[in-house]
Image (cartoon, grey):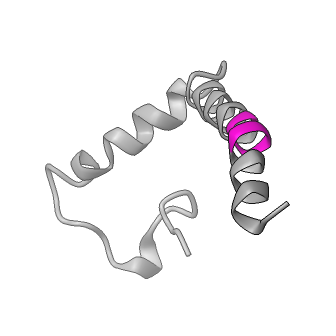
């Protein structure tokens, strides 16, 4: 069998199955139980220091310090 035929057969069967399972895994990861708190926190990052400027990095909460 030539290379093109072999690659096409692989793409039509196993790669399609892998990409479908990967897509379903990503959908499950987004909508998994308990993820709404993390998503809400990420969505509100831009409003975290809305009323006052950010503090000096040496005075930040350990939760706010990201490496």
Up/down of 30 relative to 9, above or below: above
Q: Is 23 or 43 nearer to us in this picture?
A: 23
The image shows residue 67 at horizontal and vertical percentages of 56, 75
Does residue 32 appear left or right of residue 10 in this picture?
left
Q: Is 58 or 38 nearer to us in this picture?
A: 38
The image shows residue 2 at horizontal and vertical percentages of 79, 65
Up/down of 42 relative to 29, above or below: below
Residue at screen point 57% across, 64% down: 62
Q: Is 38 or 63 nearer to us in this picture?
A: 38
Up/down of 26 relative to 58, above or below: above
| Farthest left residue in view | 51
Q: Quadrant of the N terminus?
A: bottom right
| Farthest front residue in view | 1
Answer with the quarter of the image where residue 35 lies.
Answer: top right
The image shows residue 16 at horizontal and vertical percentages of 68, 37
Does residue 9 appear left or right of residue 1 in this picture?
left
């Amino acid at each position: 069998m030539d290379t093109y035929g072999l690659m096409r057969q692989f793409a039509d069967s196993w790669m399609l199955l892998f990409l479908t399972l990967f897509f379903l895994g990503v959908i499950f990861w987004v909508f998994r139980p308990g993820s709404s708190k993390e998503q809400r926190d990420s969505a509100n990052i831009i409003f975290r220091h809305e009323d006052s400027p950010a503090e000096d990095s040496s005075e930040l909460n350990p939760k706010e310090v990201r490496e």
